[in-house]
Image (cartoon, helix red, strand yellow):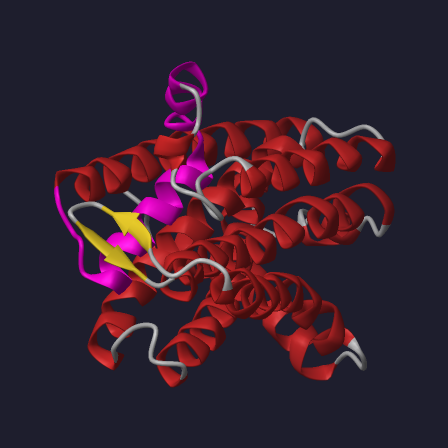
Amino acid sequence: MLSTAILARSAAVTGRNVRVLRTKKGYWLLVASAFVEPLLYFVALGWGVGSLVATVPLGDRSVSYLTFIAPAMLAASAMNGAVAEATTNFFTKAKYARLYEAALNTPLRPVEVAWGELGWATIRGSLYSVAFLVVMTALGVTTPLRALVALPAALLVGVTFGAVGLALATYMKSWQHFDYVTLAQIALLLFSGAYVPVSTYPKVFEVIVAFTPLYHGIELLRGVTVGTVGWPTALSVLYLLVLALVAVGVAGRRTAQLLRR
């Protein structure tokens, strides 16, 4: 069981990042950048392709194309924010800025650094999620009540990708390795049922997609925001929870090795 002291030290790491966001000039623009890309896709494809596609089948009903892709872009926004913070920024702090060297001369432990950074990655992802849900509600894509329910679901997506990103970052040796992370994000976004129903894929490919985290994030958020919650939604929650717990364990152990205390 986590003690109050452990939680407090982890929260101190998170709090340091929050203070940087509030005080560092221009940092807000960097933080906002990961939100803009999925928003542009949402606007361009939602209205562009949406004007050509009347409805899209979703379960036992049909919805507008704008309604179909909105939860996917919400999931992508949460993913982008959490991954950006948990990979590139964590790598910079640990490898180049040497930010944690002095901090680890205090009672702070490496595993608490990992938890604190994951907390900040989750906060960053939640900022995008809130903003995206406001846009979705304003456009009538979802209702205010469903948006409130969707927020913790979006946080789960952010936590999962933040934990996976943090674990991956501990294996990175150079900046070139982050090209693979970007490639993986693009592949996930293109082939996780964000733009077309997964049922349109070949059967073998459909099975492969069903094992990817963004697919389950999109399915979860679609179920909540559109109102098609069912057993597949519960399965997506379970998948994301298990993946998050495994990734947190790996990230904590690897961070301890990386920072070598």
Left or right: 45 in relation to 215: right
Q: Is residue 44 above or below residue 87?
A: below
Left or right: 87 in relation to 110: right
Q: Residue at x 53, y 28 (%)?
A: 253
Towards the viewer: 65 or 153:
65
Q: Is residue 86 visible?
A: yes
Q: Is residue 34 above or below residue 80?
A: below
Q: Is residue 228 magenta?
A: yes
Predominant SS of the magenta segment: helix
User: Measured from the top left, where is residue 30 in percent x and y?
Assistant: 74, 69
Q: Which residues are magenta?
A: 203-230
Q: Residue at x 72, y 50 (%)?
A: 100
Towards the viewer: 16 or 51:
51
Among the 4 quarters of the image, the one containing residue 18: bottom right
User: Measured from the top left, where is residue 38 in percent x and y?
Assistant: 59, 61
Q: Is residue 31 above or below residue 116?
A: below
Among the 4 quarters of the image, the one containing residue 67: bottom left
Q: Residue at x 52, y 47 (%)?
A: 162
Q: Is residue 130 magenta?
A: no
Quarter in which the C terminus is drawn: top right
Question: How many discs appear?
Answer: 0
Quarter in which the N terminus is drawn: top left
